[in-house]
Image (spheres, rainbow, N blue to C red):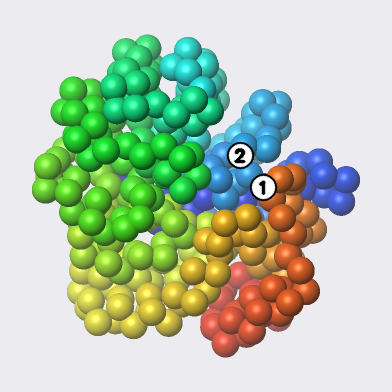
């Protein structure tokens, strides 16, 4: 079962805006050295929305060759169940273990349309499904009652990534209704990780530039919650800085570039680049924190 630290892999681009597979290979190597429990591709922090099908295929092949049996989650979906099924079957053919699926977002569905969308997927695909409940990104709210109904009807839905603020309240409602029927994951760059652990999540899916920070919190949690709390709150200013709408991807890229893992800090439209003031603010935060990714560059 998928659990623990499952970061979202960032996508590197060169100065011309093309995918930079060599930089991605360096990043994957760093993550494997630090120790992760799985890896997610094509999510929001991956700029998956801006990648072509050919680019996704090349990235997946590159990552799979390096990660071996490490569980791989791939974001897939579409504006209809027909489009989503095709996309999910594609990433399954590449070797994905879990499909992370958002509800349709162009035409906003209600609870019944959401239920039919995921039901259609489950009837036509045989890969484990993670529902991504991320209304800040999609503009679609998935009610707890709909999530519970889906999970009780379709055992293929194994996970929910809970990203509707306040995440803690929704996690408690889902945990109360579903118990251990599905695994609940946190998101939003682990900005509520300590509180979410107390509510019953089994893992988190943050950005990829601070795996050792997440590992330390997760490892401390069962034996010393005060240590976990102290570690989490020490890094919280950094975590929250990377979840800001519009510039979050550029924040992650800045760290990856400063580390030497990525050859450029290039983001793909419509993501925004950082201005100098914002870059200085980020440096002010990270200069006072030990980060393995930046230590390697010093």
Relative to 63, residue 257 above or below: below
For the point 77% across and 54% down, which residue is it? 266
Instruction: Say left or right for 85 vs 230.
Output: right
Mark 1 or mark 2, which has the lower sequence index? 1
Relative to 118, residue 9 above or below: below
Residue 55 figure quarter: top right
Where does label 2 land, which residue?
A: 48
Relative to 239, residue 224 above or below: below
For the point 62% across and 37% down, which residue is it? 49
Residue 160 figure quarter: top left
For the point 57% across and 87% down, which residue is it? 288
Are the residues at dot 1 and dot 2 in contact (C-beta closer than 8 Å)? yes
Identify the disc placed on residue 219.
Answer: none
Q: Position of residue 198 (x, y in %)?
A: 21, 65
Closer to the observer: label 1 or label 2? 2
Instruction: Say left or right for 253 vs 111.
Output: right
Q: How far is mark 1 from mark 2, CA to CA?
A: 8 Å
Q: Position of residue 6 (x, y in %)?
A: 43, 51
Crowd tier of the residue under label 2, counting other residues whose Cα lies within 10 Å: few below 14, some 14–19, many 20 or above: many
Q: Position of residue 150 (x, y in %)?
A: 23, 27
Relative to 65, residue 223 above or below: below
Where does label 1 land, which residue?
A: 11
285 or 246, nearer to the observer:
246
For the point 41% across and 65% down, which residue is it? 191
275 or 72, nearer to the observer:
275
Residue 284 figure quarter: bottom right
Crowd tier of the residue under label 1, counting other residues whose Cα lies within 10 Å: few below 14, some 14–19, many 20 or above: many
- Secondary structure at badge 1 equals loop
């Amino acid at each position: 079962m998928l659990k623990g630290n499952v970061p979202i892999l960032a996508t590197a681009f060169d100065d011309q805006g093309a995918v930079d597979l060599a930089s991605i290979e360096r990043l994957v190597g760093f993550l494997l050295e630090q120790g992760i429990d799985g890896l997610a591709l094509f999510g929001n922090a991956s700029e998956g929305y801006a990648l072509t099908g050919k680019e996704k295929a090349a990235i997946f092949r590159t990552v799979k060759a390096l990660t071996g049996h490490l569980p791989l989650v791939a974001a897939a979906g579409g504006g209809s169940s027909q489009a989503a099924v095709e996309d999910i079957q594609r990433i399954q053919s590449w070797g994905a273990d879990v499909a992370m699926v958002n509800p349709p977002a162009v035409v906003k569905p209600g609870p019944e349309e959401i239920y039919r969308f995921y039901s259609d997927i489950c009837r036509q695909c045989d890969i484990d499904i993670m529902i991504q409940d991320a209304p800040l990104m999609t503009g679609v709210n998935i009610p707890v009652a709909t999530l519970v109904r889906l999970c009780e009807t379709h055992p293929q839905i194994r996970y929910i990534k809970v990203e509707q603020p306040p995440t803690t309240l929704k996690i408690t409602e889902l945990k109360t209704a579903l118990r251990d029927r599905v695994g609940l994951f946190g998101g939003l760059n682990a900005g509520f990780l300590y509180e979410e652990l107390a509510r019953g999540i089994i893992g988190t899916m943050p950005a990829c530039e601070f795996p050792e920070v997440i590992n330390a919190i997760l490892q401390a949690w069962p034996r010393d919650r005060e240590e976990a709390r102290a570690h989490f709150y020490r890094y919280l200013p950094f975590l929250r800085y990377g979840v800001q709408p519009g510039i979050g991807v550029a924040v992650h890229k800045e760290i990856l570039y400063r580390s030497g893992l990525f050859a450029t800090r290039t983001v793909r439209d419509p993501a925004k680049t950082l201005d100098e003031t914002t870059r200085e603010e980020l440096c002010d935060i990270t200069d006072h924190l030990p980060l393995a990714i930046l230590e390697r560059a010093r």
